């Protein structure tokens, strides 16, 4: 099978049609707001909408907090497991698989039951408390990807030697983590961060059931009430996802040059 | 009588010619090795014989039949790969019997043949194991059994020992050669390891940059290398630059010292600059005897390797290596001592003008 | 005195290092406990409780209601359909690009696109497919204007089982490609060479070597796709909503209190979901580790 076979070309052609058609269709549909002509009116309306701005901002802020919390949770864990607790590796990896096995809707249902206003940690009792719960839920959802990214990044650098070198200079562990380890896995953290951002921005289930004004429920509401704006939003959502993934690729290629400098 | 004929084979990829004018006749039952550094074209040539690459020009004949354009699956050859290439979804028995199953042989015949092959490689107890449960050496033996089970006309081996431990390499190459002699199968072996090539082959084809530098029996290749490349690729060799003084008498000057060349001066001109080669074991420490050549120098280094004592001696411009057998009665020389080595006139190899 | 005291400081130091490590990973485990394990376990316990908190099998029994059984079946059908076709087309596309002799730049393009598309699910995806195959969708109008073929007149509707399955394929196919690519990469070219020298033609090689080697990975990936579709809700909610009563939609309604306010039944529904996704994922992991062992 050295020359491109007919079947292979056919499969690729069909694949291209199936995957490009919705993108073209959505873009075309989003331009149809003004009857009889193509215009970006739908986009203008969306950007001008107060709800768009506030819900996007809300989700963006939550995404940033999720990223910070996620890194703070995952990085030390991956570090300690690699350095001193290798027997915990299997357990930790099992835990990072849980968000992928437990459907989001089941998880949020569990949150609502466990942390409702009559429980020992009444997070759903207040607006801010629910925001906290939502953020922690996002940390859980993004955890598999953040862990995989950071774990791979840590394995690429010699954690043991770096730690010993820093210790011999008198550094304590917070300093080691912050000043020595973290800067060397910068690209892994950024990859995890962009993936988290993409996940949080588009997330619907948690936000909707916890009744928070996030971007996901906003999208769904627009879809139920407007005709052309949803298409514009879909185009924007796809563009954001592409941008995040594209940045991850770019970072990934840059990393290969920078990690060589750790020796 | 010639069984495998390779005529004027050439292989080019675009502007890059990887194999140039390869001519070789291989007898039935002969064990031939293609030897050379990576990139010399030996594997490409083997793959052309196997049928995986089509020659850009030239022809391949097996037992008189032109197979140049016959596909690999119809040439009736057996092949062993460097990475063993055992099918992971089949047991050892399944792998060994694969060729026969493909040919739709009856089940009883397949079982009998598989048993026979497993006996031959002395691994009948592993017949129900899977490849991932075997060591590298065991996998390679199974690979050999699999290649030989369908009774091919020719056996091809592509660096089969390179992925194995040094210890297993030596025992396995003896096994392969013994098997090949017993079965009498025409074999081509590809390697970059000259020790393998010399110890296993009936003939060695030394290749360099797509060309054949020399073809001959191991003894010939080692003692009578035709080119500087062959001389330096096989074994350790001392290469000294010098000048032809008088081709009629055999007088030459190497590193400023006058010696007599016993052979290899045909067609040489007086005053011509040439390279001369000497095997370390051809040199003897000590004052010369009449009729032998003598070189003077200073002991630079002594390495005690066990059975061999390797001495490095500095001449005016070069350093030469002298190998002597260990003897409990003779102590190795001291560093810095002036010393002489002698060698027979016939032992000096005059290399072709480059 | 100094020689007796020397070993102890280093052992004390080693101990304090270990203690430090345990403290370092504690937050992670506390988080996992509080926001992954406890909520789920609590939910599962709730499935066996009634309104007063007493133990009962009542909720589980009520899962046997025809409407709920129908809902599970529907979910299984949608998930199975999107898993089956996602696996088929994903495998075909992966094989075509990785082994079909096509230009080399297609592979990184496919991998990047699959990485993006497998994350492009939920509400925007539903919008995209409505814009494509809705009554006024781009492709609908294209087919009608160019070929005179009105798919809606022929009975097609994007807001149905078929439409949802078709939409799910947009992230199922890329997921299949991502999961099955390492297995296809593991098919060594020497196997093909070896099979050829042993007399096998292409068909025999594929039938006797490639497909059996890939089979555990294909099965495992299909199960992963199945679990993935089973737990998905956002796309379905935005596309078919309550008109297609798959289990997540049912559960959503229970949580929102749109139907009878009966959280315990909801817990039982969640238990059922978790069992199905849990078993599928377990099977996927077992099959994957088996094929990794083979291809070691």
Image (tube, coloured by chain):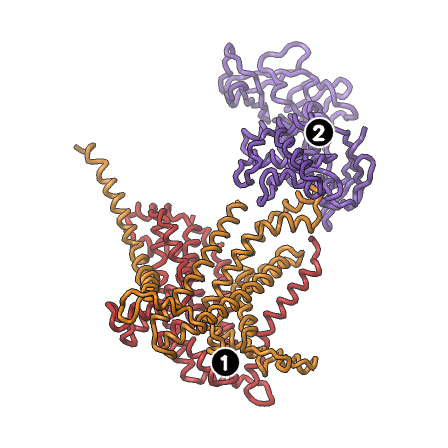
Chain colours: A red, B purple, C orange
Q: Quadrant of residue C68?
A: bottom left
Which residue occupies 45% across, 65% down? A195
Image quarter where the C terminus of chain B lies is top right
In this rendering, do the residues under marks 2 and 1 share a single chain? no
Q: Quadrant of residue A99?
A: bottom left
> What is the number of the mark on residue B31?
2
Specify the subunit that label 1 lies on: A
A239 lies left or right of B113: left
Residue B346: percent from the left, percent from the top?
A: 70, 18
- Residue of label 1: A230
A199 lies left or right of C2: right
The residue closer to the viewer here, B240 or A101, is A101
Q: Residues within 10 Å of mark 2 (few under 14, many from 20)?
A: many
Residue B212: percent from the left, percent from the top?
A: 73, 35
Q: How many marks?
A: 2
Which residue occupies 59% across, 12% down? B287
Between the C-alphas of marks 2 and 1, the distance is 74 Å
Answer whether labels 2 and 1 touch (C-beta < 8 Å): no
Residue A170: percent from the left, percent from the top?
A: 28, 48
> What is the number of the mark on residue B25?
none
Residue situated furthest bottom in the rendering: A35
The residue closer to the viewer here, B234 or C271, is C271
Specify the subunit that label 2 lies on: B
Residue situated furthest left in the rendering: C1
The residue closer to the viewer here, C206 or C111, is C206
Residue A27 shows up from this direction: no
B77 lies left or right of B338: right
Q: Is residue B101 above or below residue A236?
A: above
Which residue occupies 33% across, 45% down? A164
Q: Quadrant of residue B207?
A: top right
Residue B218 shows up from this direction: yes
């Amino acid at each position: 099978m050295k020359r491109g076979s007919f079947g292979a070309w056919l499969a690729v052609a069909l694949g291209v049609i199936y995957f490009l058609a919705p993108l073209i269709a959505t873009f075309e549909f989003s331009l149809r707001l003004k009857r009889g002509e193509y215009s970006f009116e739908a986009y203008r309306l969306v950007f001008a909408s107060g709800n768009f701005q506030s819900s996007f901002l809300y989700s963006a802020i939550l995404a940033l907090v999720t990223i910070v919390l996620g890194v703070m949770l995952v990085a030390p864990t991956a570090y300690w497991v690699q350095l001193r607790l290798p027997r915990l590796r299997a357990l930790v990896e099992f835990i990072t698989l849980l968000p992928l096995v437990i459907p989001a809707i089941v998880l949020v249902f569990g949150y609502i039951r466990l942390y409702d206003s009559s429980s020992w940690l009444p997070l759903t009792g207040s607006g801010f408390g629910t925001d906290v719960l939502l953020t922690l839920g996002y940390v859980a959802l993004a955890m598999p990807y953040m862990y995989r990214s950071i774990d791979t990044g840590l394995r690429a650098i010699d954690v043991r030697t770096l730690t010993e070198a820093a210790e011999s200079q008198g550094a304590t562990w917070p300093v080691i983590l912050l000043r020595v380890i973290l800067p060397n896995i910068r690209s892994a953290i950024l990859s995890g961060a962009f993936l988290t951002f993409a996940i949080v921005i588009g997330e619907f289930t948690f936000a909707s059931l916890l009744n928070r004004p996030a971007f996901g429920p906003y999208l769904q509401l627009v879809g139920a009430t407007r005709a052309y704006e949803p298409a514009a939003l879909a185009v924007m959502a796809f563009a954001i996802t592409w941008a995040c993934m594209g940045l991850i690729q770019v970072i990934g290629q840059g990393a290969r040059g920078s990690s060589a400098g750790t020796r | 009588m010639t069984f495998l004929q390779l005529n004027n084979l050439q292989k080019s990829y675009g502007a890059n010619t990887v194999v140039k004018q390869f001519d070789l006749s291989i007898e039935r039952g002969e064990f031939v090795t293609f030897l050379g550094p990576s990139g010399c074209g030996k594997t490409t040539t083997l793959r052309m014989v196997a049928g995986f690459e089509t020659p850009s020009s030239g022809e391949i004949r097996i037992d008189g039949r032109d197979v140049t354009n016959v596909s690999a699956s119809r040439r009736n050859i057996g092949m062993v790969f460097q990475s063993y290439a055992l099918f992971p979804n089949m047991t050892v028995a399944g792998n060994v019997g694969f060729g026969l199953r493909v040919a739709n042989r009856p089940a009883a015949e397949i079982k009998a043949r598989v048993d026979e092959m497993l006996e031959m490689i002395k691994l009948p107890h592993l017949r129900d194991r899977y490849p991932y449960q075997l060591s590298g050496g065991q996998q390679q033996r199974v690979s050999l059994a699999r290649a030989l089970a369908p009774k091919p006309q020719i056996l091809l081996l592509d660096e089969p020992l390179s992925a194995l431990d040094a210890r297993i390499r030596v025992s396995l190459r003896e096994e392969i050669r013994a098997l090949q002699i017993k079965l009498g199968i025409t074999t081509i072996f590809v390697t970059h390891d000259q020790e393998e090539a010399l110890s296993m082959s009936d003939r060695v084809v030394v290749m360099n940059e797509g060309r054949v530098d020399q073809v001959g029996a191991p003894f010939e290749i080692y003692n009578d290398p035709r080119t500087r490349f062959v001389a330096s690729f096989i074994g350790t060799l001392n290469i000294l630059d010098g000048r032809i003084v008088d081709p009629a008498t055999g007088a030459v000057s190497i590193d400023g010292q006058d010696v007599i060349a016993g052979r290899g001066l045909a067609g040489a001109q007086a005053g011509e600059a040439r390279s001369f080669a000497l095997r370390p074991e051809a040199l003897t420490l000590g004052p010369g005897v009449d009729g032998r050549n003598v070189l003077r120098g200073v002991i630079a280094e002594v390495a005690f390797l066990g059975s061999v004592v390797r001495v490095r001696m500095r001449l005016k411009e070069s350093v030469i290596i002298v190998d002597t057998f260990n003897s409990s009665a003779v102590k190795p020389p001291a560093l810095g001592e002036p010393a002489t080595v002698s060698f027979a006139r016939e032992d000096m190899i005059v290399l072709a003008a480059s | 005195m100094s020689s007796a005291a020397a070993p102890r400081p280093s052992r004390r130091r080693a101990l304090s290092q270990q203690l430090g490590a345990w403290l370092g990973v504690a937050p992670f485990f506390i988080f996992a406990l509080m926001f992954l394990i406890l909520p789920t376990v609590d939910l599962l316990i709730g499935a066996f409780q009634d309104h007063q908190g007493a133990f009962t099998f009542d909720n589980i029994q009520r899962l046997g209601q025809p409407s709920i059984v129908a809902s599970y079946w529907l979910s299984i059908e949608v998930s199975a359909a999107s898993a089956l076709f996602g696996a088929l087309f994903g495998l075909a596309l992966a094989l075509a690009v990785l082994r079909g002799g096509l230009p080399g730049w297609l592979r990184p393009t496919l991998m990047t696109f699959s990485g993006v598309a497998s994350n492009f699910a939920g509400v925007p995806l539903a919008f995209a497919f409505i814009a494509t195959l809705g009554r006024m969708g781009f492709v609908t109008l294209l087919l009608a204007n160019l070929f005179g073929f009105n798919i809606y007149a022929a009975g097609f509707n994007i807001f149905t089982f078929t439409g949802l399955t078709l939409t799910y394929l947009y992230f199922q196919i890329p997921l299949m490609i991502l999961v099955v690519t390492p297995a296809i990469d593991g098919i060594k070219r020497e196997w093909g060479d070896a099979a050829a020298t042993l007399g096998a033609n292409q068909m025999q090689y594929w039938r006797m070597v490639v497909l059996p080697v890939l089979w555990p990975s294909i099965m495992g990936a299909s199960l992963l796709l199945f679990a993935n579709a089973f737990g998905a809700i956002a796309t379905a909610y935005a596309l078919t909503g309550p008109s297609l009563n798959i289990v997540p939609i049912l559960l959503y309604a229970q949580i929102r209190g749109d139907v009878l306010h009966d959280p315990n039944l909801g817990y039982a529904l969640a238990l059922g979901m978790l069992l199905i996704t849990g078993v599928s994922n377990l099977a996927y992991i077992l099959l994957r580790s088996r094929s990794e062992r083979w291809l070691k």
